[in-house]
Amino acid sequence: MNEIISFDEIDKHGPQTCRGSYELSAGEVEGDEIANAGAVSIDATADKGHIAGEYIVDGSANFTADLTCSRCVEPYPFANASSFHVRFRPRPESLGEENEEVEISDEELDVEFYTERTVPLRDLALEQIQLAIPMKPLCDEACLGLCPRCGANKSREECSCDQLATDERWSALEGIRAQLKKKEV
Ligand SMILES: [Zn+2]
Ligand SMILES: [Zn+2]
């Protein structure tokens, strides 16, 4: 099965269908959230678009990994399935020129500008993964996180820090009260 989308091939032979599955290494996917990168499988169909030089890629990606919970810092299994629709257009000559605002309308949000006429499926899969990873991964919405004092995982164990903190707050109050009394005198 083809693992590289080639715009030249599409010009010559029409729509292209690609499929690939990849094992990923942790370094390949950006982000500290990833404890263990897993596997990704991707399906894509590529065809010519409506304007000259445009190619449209439709597909879906499934990916699994272990993410690190942003609250308790424990790894947990994560799975994501997403579909995508990307329009590849030749990089406009005007990009980077002065006094030339390149407006990106909502309609163009899924546009990627290309210079190379081939797109490795693996790169496309990595892009989808990057989009799928949550900004603040949570092992559970109800995760209680770590105790800021002793580092205990509060979803799993109770520590006595809360009690101590309360006691300290009370003694601080006592101190203020004593100061106020002095002023009154
Ligand atoms: Zn957690
Ligand atoms: Zn604690």
Image: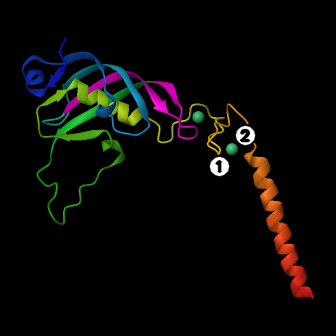
In the rendered image, the residue lying farthest to the bottom is 185
Amino acid type, mark 1: Arg
Where's the N terminus, which quadrant?
A: top left
Q: Which of marks 1 and 2 is nearer the N terminus?
A: 1
Q: Residue 166 occupies which quadrant of the picture?
A: bottom right
Query: As displayed, is residue 126 above or below residue 104?
Result: above
Q: Is the magenta stretch mostly helix, strand or loop?
A: strand
> Can you tell me whether the CB of the residue at mark 2 lies under 8 Å from the nearest atom of ligand 2?
yes
Crowd tier of the residue under label 2, counting other residues whose Cα lies within 10 Å: few below 14, some 14–19, many 20 or above: some
| Mark drawn on residue 159 | 2
- Relative to 81, is 50 on the left or the right? left
Q: Assign a secondary structure to mark 1.
A: loop
Q: How many marks?
A: 2
Q: Position of residue 135 (x, y in %)?
A: 47, 42
> Can you tell me whether the CB of the residue at mark 1 lies under 8 Å from the nearest atom of ligand 2?
yes
Q: Are marks 1 and 2 in contact (CB under 8 Å)?
A: yes
Residue at 31% over, 24% down = 24
Q: Which of 162 and 50 is in front in this view?
A: 162
| Disc 1: which residue | 149
Q: Position of residue 85 (x, y in %)?
A: 32, 30
**Which residue range is magenta in the image?**
55-79
Q: Assign a secondary structure to mark 2.
A: loop
Residue at 82% over, 74% down = 176
Amino acid type, mark 2: Cys
